[in-house]
């Protein structure tokens, strides 16, 4: 397995967030960032050029190679606000039923705008995700 391309950078999270053109997307990103900071107790860090990540966890692949990744994070992409729920969604079925309008990938939650979902449910999902990651992985 090749080395991960997306890594923490020294880029400014503030500058990245301020550069979001769409006012609503910028406001949504700030709210999600506040939820993630509260859930992790960690400050935001840029991971690559477009992901805002919080906290870290360590894992090994089947070949025994060690990697680090964010506990949670988001990216305000053009099509949707992408929220990284690292353990996936299967253990959060009851929350997902109450969340609102969204799509998912393996660990990605895609929402058009924060007003499409119940913010309190989203916050519980983020907190539950971080809690689960801390139970399973070495975190920092």
Image (tube, grey):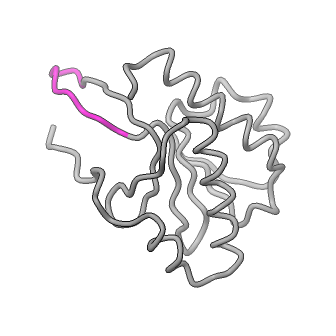
Q: Position of residue 25 (x, y in %)?
A: 65, 72
Q: Residue at x 43, y 58 (%)?
A: 51
Q: Residue at x 50, y 48 (%)?
A: 73
Q: Position of residue 130 (x, y in %)?
A: 56, 30
Name the quarter where the N terminus is drawn. top left
Please tell me whether residue 53 belongs to the stretch shown in magenta. Answer: no
Please tell me whether residue 67 belongs to the stretch shown in magenta. Answer: yes
Span shown in magenta:
61-69
Q: Position of residue 2 (x, y in %)?
A: 14, 43
The picture quadrant where one finds residue 32 is bottom right
User: Quick check: 66 above or below 11?
Assistant: above
- Disc tally is 0
Left-right relation of 140 to 102: left
User: Quick check: 140 above or below 80?
Assistant: above
Which one is nearer the viewer's eye here, 83 or 101?
A: 83
Residue 14, visible in the rendered structure: yes
Q: Residue at x 24, y 25 (%)?
A: 61
User: Quick check: 133 above or below 117?
Assistant: above
């Amino acid at each position: 397995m090749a080395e991960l391309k997306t890594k923490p950078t020294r880029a400014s999270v503030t500058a990245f967030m301020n550069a979001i053109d769409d006012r609503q997307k910028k406001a949504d990103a700030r709210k999600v960032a506040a939820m993630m900071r509260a859930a992790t107790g960690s400050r935001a860090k840029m991971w690559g050029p477009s992901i805002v990540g919080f906290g870290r966890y360590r894992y090994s692949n089947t070949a025994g190679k060690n990697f680090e990744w964010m506990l949670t994070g988001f990216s305000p992409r053009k099509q949707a606000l992408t929220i990284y729920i690292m353990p996936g969604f299967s253990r959060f079925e009851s929350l997902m039923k109450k969340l609102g309008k969204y799509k998912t990938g393996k660990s990605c939650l895609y929402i058009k705008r924060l007003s499409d979902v119940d913010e309190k449910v989203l916050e519980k999902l983020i907190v539950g995700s971080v809690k689960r990651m801390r139970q399973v992985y070495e975190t920092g």
